[in-house]
Amino acid sequence: MRTLSVLVLALSLHTAYADPLTDIGGDVSATRLMDTVKYLSGATSSIATRFSPTAGSVAAQNWLKNQFQVLGYPTVLQDWGTYQGYPCSDNVIARKVGVLYPETIYVICAHYDSTSNNPWSLAPGADDNASGVAAVLEAALLLKDYPTDYTIEFVTFSGEEQGLYGSRYYVQNPGGRQWAGAINLDMIGYAPVANPSLWVVSCTSPSPIADLVRAISLYLNPGTPVVRYTYPYGVSDNYPFYQNNVPECLLIEHDFGDSNPYYHKTTDTWDKLTAEYLRVCATAGIASVAYAAGVSNGYAAVLMPEYVGSRAGLGVEMQLREPDGGPLVATYAVTLDAAGVFRLPDELPRGTWDLAVKAPGWLRRVSAHAAIPNLQGLSFTLVPGDVSGDNVVDITDLALLLAAFGLSTPGADVDGSGTVGIEDLNLVLIHFGDTGD
C-alpha cells in the first residue's frame, strides 16, 4: 500500500517560448550588432587593430571573454600558439550545456582577428570580421535563457588571417568534444547592391547543415536571395571542421565576399556596413544554430522514482488555465521518457497562465503563475490525495473526495478500524484512482 505522505512529484519548469525560429530570429537587433562592430573596430573603443600578435587583439579577446561571462556562460581562453615567434591572442570559447545530449556540440563561430595594409597599427576589420563576431555575441545573448537539447559552443577565433591557426587548433584538440555541426560567419555586413544576396557555402555537397541554414534564411528572410555554393578550399574557419569530418558551412555576404572594396584595408570601418543587411545575415546563422541544437519550450523533470525507468511512455496531462482559478483553456498530452522527463508542448501560447499537471494516481493539481515566454525557475509540487490543495493530506481531503461521489464522511470507515482517518483515504484512492479535476 502506498503511503501518501511520502509520495511527492516535483516539477521544475524552465524558460519557455513558442517558436525557436520566429521568436529568436525576430529578436535579433541590428542596433546591438552594430554596437559590437563599432566597439571592436575602434569607433567606440581604443582598439585600433586586432591583428593577432598585437595588444589590440588581446584587448578584444579579453572584452569578448567578459561579454560571455556577463551573460553567465562558462568561458575559457584557448592558446593556439605563436605566429612567426610572436605570442598571439587566444580563441575565446563559451559553452551552453545541452539538457538531453550534453556531450554533443553545435558550434557557431567567427574570427575576431583582423588585418589590413598596415596591420600592426591600424586594422579596424569592421566587416572582416567584427560583423561575424557580433552575430556570435548576439546568439549568446538571445539563447542564454532557453534550454537546448544539444550543447552549443560560441567560439571566436584568433589567427584566422594568419592561416586559420585558431580554428585548426580548436578542431585538432577536441578535448573530448563530439561535434554535430559548425556554422561559421565571416564578412556578413557589406551590402553593395539594393537587394544583396546571402551566400551559404560548404566545403562539400550535400551538406545538411548548409541546407538547413539556407532553408531557415529563406523562411525568415523571404526577400533576401540565398546562394548555395560549394567551395572545398580553406578560405575561412569552417575549413578545419570539414577536414575533420564535421558538418560545416560558411555564411558570407553577397558575391562570396568579393564585392567589398575595403577588404583587408584600413578603410574597413563600421560606416561601410548596412545594419539591416547585417541583421538579416546574422538572423540566418542564429536561428539555424538554435534550431539545430533543439531549442524548445523547456523541460519538466519528474523527480520521483516511481516515474522513472519502468514508467517510460506514461501519458501525463498538461493543463493550461486562466490565472487565479480561472477556467481551463487547453490540455496537452505529454509523455514521460525513460529518465522521467517530459517536455512542455511547443504550442503553449504566450501569456500568463496557471499551469497544472495531472498524472495517474494524482488527484489534485497545484498550479502557479507562468509567464510565457519568460518563464524562469518556477517549481511546484503535486501531492497525491491533496484534494483541497493545501499541500497537506488529511481528513478534509477525504471528505472532499467522498463528496465528489455523493458520499459523506461518517460512512467512510473503509478499513473497519472504528475511526475515519488517513488510511481510509488511502483505501479510497486505491479503489477510485484518479478522480480528475
Image (tube, rainbow, N blue to C red):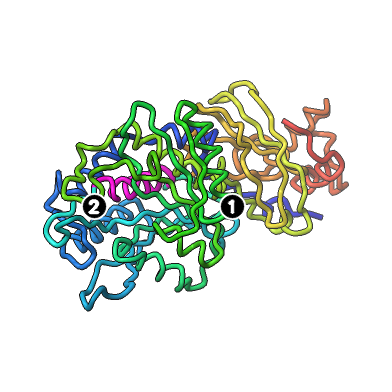
**In the orientation shown, which residue stands out farthest toward the top?**
327
Q: Tell me whether circle 2 and circle 1 mark residues in contact (CB < 8 Å).
A: no
User: Is residue 237 something that shows in the picture?
Assistant: yes
Instruction: Please identify the quarter of the rendering in which residue 338 is found.
Output: bottom right
Return the residue nearer the eye: 250 or 203: 203
- The residue drawn where x is 38% and y is 41% is 253
Q: Residues within 10 Å of mark 1 (few under 14, many from 20)?
A: some
Q: Residue at x 56, y 28 (%)?
A: 349
Instruction: Give, as a single range, the part of the protein colored magenta.
Output: 126-143
- Expressed as whole percent of the image width and height from the top left, the position of residue 171 reads 46, 68
Furthest-bottom residue in view?
Answer: 85
Check disc 1 and report its element: helix, strand or loop.
loop
Q: Which residue is mark 2?
A: 264
Label 2 Cα crowd, 10 Å radius (few <14 / some 14-19 / many 20+):
many
Residue 140 belongs to magenta span: yes
Choose top left, top right, bottom left or bottom right for residue 145: top left
Image coordinates of residue 380 in percent, x first then y, are 56, 43
Q: Position of residue 212 (x, y in %)?
A: 56, 43
Q: Residue at x 25, y 66 (%)?
A: 89
Which amino acid, mark 2?
His
Amino acid type at mark 1: Ser
Give the labeled residue for mark 1.
Answer: 205
* Count of picture labels: 2
Q: Nearer the viewer, residue 90 or 187?
A: 187
Hey, which quadrant is residue 192 in on the image?
A: top left
